[in-house]
Image (cartoon, coloured by chain):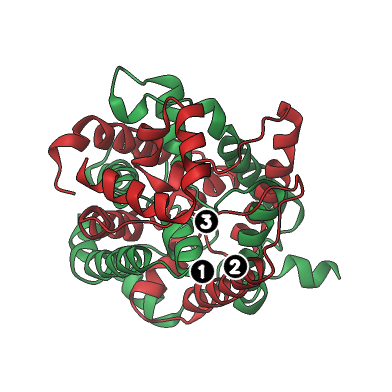
Amino acid sequence: MMEVLSSPWKWYVAGPLIGLIVPTLLVIGNKTFGISASMRHICAACAPAGVKFFKYDWKKEVWNLYFVGGIIIGAIVATLFLGNGKPIDVSPKLAEELAQYGIANFDGLVPRDLFSWENLLTLKGFLLMVVGGFLVGFGSRYAGGCTSGHAIMGLSSLQLPSLIATISFMVGGFLMANFLLPFILKL
Amino acid sequence: MKNLTETQKKNAQIQPSELLQTREANADFEVRSLDAMCVNESRLKHKWHHDLKYVAVGTLLGIIFVKAELISWFRIQEMFRLQSFHMYGVIGSAVAVGAMSVWLIRKFKVKTIYGEPIEIRPKTFNKGQIIGGLLFGLGWAMTGACPGPLYAQIGAGATVIVATLLSAILGTWVYGYFRDRLPH
């Protein structure tokens, strides 16, 4: 049993479980699955600064902050108690490509050769962590949702705007990973 | 603002009396409905400990995120390079199960545990879904994480991702500040 839990979970286990979060949130409180809105609530709670977009009663949405708090707890639990301590099994093609840029440490889910406090203020690290993060926050709010709100919840309820958003996410990701990221990783 | 009136018209066709009530009850309904993702459908007020059930669901999701390596930068790179089926399998099967559940909820008019009818507010199209979506995609492939995984990466011990999350919150704030001047 522990071995099943501690080895990486297959897509056909993880995917359906994530799919079940959609009806669970609806049934336990009429909530639509979405994560990026939590960052809007944080803005509204901490720094509304008179901006109309943040002038709403964020306390009515506080469930979303409890939800992301749970995500952090779950990640801690999984890492501390359900891990098998093995490096990530990376596709040989990707490993070969990353080797060119000196990325060879596959110990963590996040590559330690790129994402570390020491790298934060290098040009490469700043682009990947700070500029990348900014784009995630700005883009998801501009699009009205992220992977959870549009790709999972939106597609599950058959909404065309969510399909358009999901396709845009994928196009942006393909462009970055295949055409722009190589230049950043070379820095 | 044009979008807003369209949304309201659409909503009004569905449940006119109920929505009118909401609008009167929530002074901030207009601001909240500008962004359909954010409207809390429940009209019930609960004590804070009711929100603990969302911590439980979040915890389950955090465990799945880590155990299925969905928060791994490497898995995201494989997805965008078509080197692995894993992420497509996860998202595809999640949508299939989610869609089936939503269909069942609608068909059998399932109610919440508090007896409220379940509502899923329709989203309206605007250009933001394309422009914002593309920008989001660029950031997704750089950080290897969308918002959920950002939280989970921090929990998984990558403390530097706090900087990425703060930057994402800043991005959200900057969007809010310039919202009226951006094409929608």
Expressed as whole percent of the image width and height from the top left, the position of residue A114 reads 37, 52
Is the C-beta separation of discs 2 and 3 under 8 Å? yes
Tell me how far mark 1 sits from mark 2, CA to CA. 7 Å
Expressed as whole percent of the image width and height from the top left, the position of residue B43 reads 61, 36
Depth check, front residue: A52 or A75: A52
Circle 3: residue type: Ile
The kind of secondary structure element at disc 2 is helix
Circle 2: residue type: Val
Nearer-N-terminus badge (2/3): 2
Q: Which residue is mark 1?
A: A156
Residue B143 visible in the current orientation? yes
Q: Which mark is residue B120?
A: 3
Name the residue rendered at 51%, 28% in the picture. Answer: B25
Expressed as whole percent of the image width and height from the top left, the position of residue A13 reads 67, 74
Q: Which residue is mark 2?
A: B102
User: Is B123 displayed left or right of B64 in the figure?
Assistant: left
Name the residue rendered at 22%, 40% in the picture. Answer: B1
Task: Give the residue furthest to the front.
Answer: B17
Q: Residues within 10 Å of mark 3 (few under 14, many from 20)?
A: some
Label 1 marks which chain's residue? A
User: Is A134 displayed left or right of A61 in the figure?
Assistant: left
Tell me how far mark 1 sits from mark 3, CA to CA. 11 Å
Letter of the chain shown green in the rendering: A
Asked if A129 appears above or below A111 in the picture, the reply is: above
Letter of the chain shown red in the rendering: B
Mark 1 vs mark 2: same chain? no
